[in-house]
């Protein structure tokens, strides 16, 4: 999505997107290069990837000394390689193309607090997260709340913030996440008191939080991630941008700054102009391409092994797995239920990440399964009451229409729901393996350890009376074994979840 101020003339819009007018005497031009949500290290269908991103960043840095390269979070997970090295390769690759500032995203915490701290300890670039603290309320090792960057005689105060709902969406353990808007506003005031000419927030934030931050006037420029949108918004006072995902597109914000007066009389005026790089038109950087190839070759030796054939097509797009029953969700839930010997299985649609179309006849490989299930979640069984099972399904259906990751993909269940009913009262009926749900009975529910910890709001799966069998196997491994056992996968949407 791209938003541009409607009050601007057509000529003005053209200037914004082309890089703006020539500099007047005494003006300074800054360039902010923004990326966010970089999961894939290499291109897909000739677009995105670290080699093309590196080419853009290196060209911008060669063009001007006044460049600030910002990464707005989500990079060590999820990806195929991260299932093996817990994101170490992404830190190594970005160390070769170091951002001037990095704000962690929620997926940085997918492997837990210890792995997060290890990865950030390996980073050779500044990590800013003003709203992140340890369990005792202290700032984390190697982290900063803010920093002051000098470019072209200007002082740019930068504050970072991570997603405030990370505790629900990921696995950060005891780490604490304060509200973004209030935290950024307080940090920005301090930066202005320290003499910042411009204030910049690099944040991983959902759309509503981004809009609130923009409306607050707390900072001049917001460089954001999390929503996977190509987004440009300027209301005459505050600029908000996001660069999609996987470096398919990269936004450069050229800011022309005019300075008048000195000391207490110093006045700053600024104007943004935007350039959008479609990286399909960018020649990959050879040095970064060589680094990426070393990891890709290592993966290929292990992963390009066929384990089953598809009798029907599978769609793992976000709209499919987060918007309703999906055939690939049926297959994965069936695999989990069969392998764990459970009555039913529930998986969060947001845990299926391949975003791919597989045609009938496709030979499914280990690579495919790990692409779809990159988080390293483990298979578990929890024994809960029918009441808790119904509550879990209500939670899964609580964000219908929003393509939320909590949408359930199920096995052993037939669910009828009323999409127009209030949240918490949408379930019309549930059958468990052909029989109506008995709220007083107890059921063995196969799921993943993320959901068992309350991830995506599934708190009822660990209700006080639940008994848990902890699994030692990754869900991806269980899916591979099941696929080998059946040989041919003939999963089709069959009415497991009907929303009226």
Image (cartoon, grey):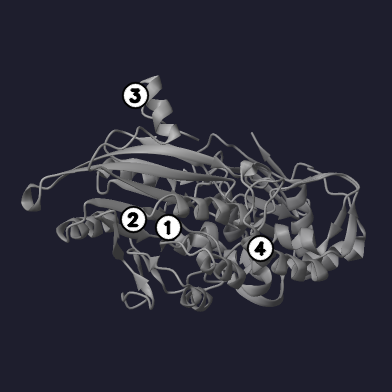
Dot 3 or dot 4, earlier in sequence: 3
What residue would you read off at disc 4? 441
Q: Secondary structure at mark 4?
A: loop
Q: Position of residue 355 (x, y in %)?
A: 69, 48
Q: Would residue 176 appear left or right of 498 to someone viewing this image?
A: left
Q: Is residue 321 visible?
A: yes
Query: Mark 3, mark 2: which one is toward the viewer?
Result: 3
Q: Position of residue 396 (x, y in %)?
A: 58, 51
Q: Residue at x 41, y 62 (%)?
A: 100
Residue 236 marker: none
Gap between marks 3 and 2, in whole Å? Answer: 30 Å
Which of 178/50 is in front? 50
Dot 3 or dot 2, earlier in sequence: 3
Which of 28/41 is in front? 28
Dot 3 or dot 1, earlier in sequence: 3
**Of all residues shown, which one is farthest toward the top?**
10
Place residue 238 in its image quadrant: top left
Dot 1 or dot 2, earlier in sequence: 1
Which of 336/464 is in front? 336
| 269 relative to 473, above or below | above
């Amino acid at each position: 999505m791209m938003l541009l101020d409607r009050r601007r003339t057509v000529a003005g819009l053209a200037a914004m997107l082309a890089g703006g007018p020539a500099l007047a005497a005494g003006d300074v031009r800054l360039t902010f290069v923004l990326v966010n949500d970089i999961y894939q290290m290499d291109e897909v269908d000739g677009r995105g990837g670290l080699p093309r991103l590196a080419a853009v960043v290196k060209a911008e840095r060669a063009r001007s000394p006044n460049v600030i390269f910002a990464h707005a979070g989500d990079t060590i997970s999820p990806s195929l390689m991260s299932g093996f090295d817990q994101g170490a390769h992404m830190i190594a690759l970005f160390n070769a193309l170091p951002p001037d500032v990095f704000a962690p995203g929620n997926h940085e915490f997918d492997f837990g607090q210890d792995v997060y701290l290890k990865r950030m300890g390996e980073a050779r670039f500044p990590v800013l997260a003003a709203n992140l603290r340890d369990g005792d309320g202290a700032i984390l090792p190697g982290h900063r709340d803010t920093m002051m960057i000098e470019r072209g005689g200007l002082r740019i105060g930068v504050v970072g913030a991570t997603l405030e709902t990370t505790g629900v969406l990921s696995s950060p353990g005891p780490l604490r996440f304060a509200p973004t808007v209030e935290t950024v506003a307080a940090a920005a005031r301090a930066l202005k008191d320290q003499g910042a000419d411009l204030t910049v927030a690099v944040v991983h934030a959902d759309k509503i939080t981004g809009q609130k931050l923009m409306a607050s006037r707390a900072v001049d420029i917001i460089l954001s991630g999390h929503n996977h949108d190509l987004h440009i918004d300027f209301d005459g006072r505050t600029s908000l941008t996001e660069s999609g995902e996987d470096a398919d597109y990269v936004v450069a914000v050229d800011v022309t700054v005019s300075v008048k007066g000195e000391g207490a009389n110093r006045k700053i005026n600024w104007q943004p102009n935007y350039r959008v790089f479609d990286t399909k038109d960018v020649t990959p950087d050879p040095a970064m391409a060589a680094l990426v190839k070393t990891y890709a070759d290592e993966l290929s030796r292990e992963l390009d092994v066929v384990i089953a054939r598809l009798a029907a097509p599978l769609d793992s797009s976000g709209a499919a797995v987060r918007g309703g029953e999906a055939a690939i969700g049926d297959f994965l839930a069936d695999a989990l239920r069969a392998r764990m010997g459970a009555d039913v299985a529930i998986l969060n649609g947001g845990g299926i990440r391949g975003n791919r179309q597989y045609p009938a006849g496709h030979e499914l490989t280990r690579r495919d399964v790990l692409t779809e299930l990159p988080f390293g979640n483990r298979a578990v069984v929890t024994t809960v009451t029918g009441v808790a099972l119904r509550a879990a399904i209500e939670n899964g259906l609580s964000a219908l229409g929003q393509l939320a990751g909590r949408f359930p993909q199920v096995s052993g269940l037939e669910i009828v729901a009323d999409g127009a009913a209030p949240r918490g009262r949408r379930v019309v009926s549930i059958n468990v393996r052909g029989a109506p749900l008995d709220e007083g009975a107890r059921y063995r529910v196969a799921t993943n350890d993320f959901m068992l910890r309350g991830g995506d709001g599934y708190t009822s799966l660990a209700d006080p009376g639940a008994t848990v069998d902890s699994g030692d196997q990754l869900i991806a491994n269980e899916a591979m074994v099941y696929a080998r056992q059946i040989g041919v996968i003939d999963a089709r949407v069959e009415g497991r979840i009907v929303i009226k």
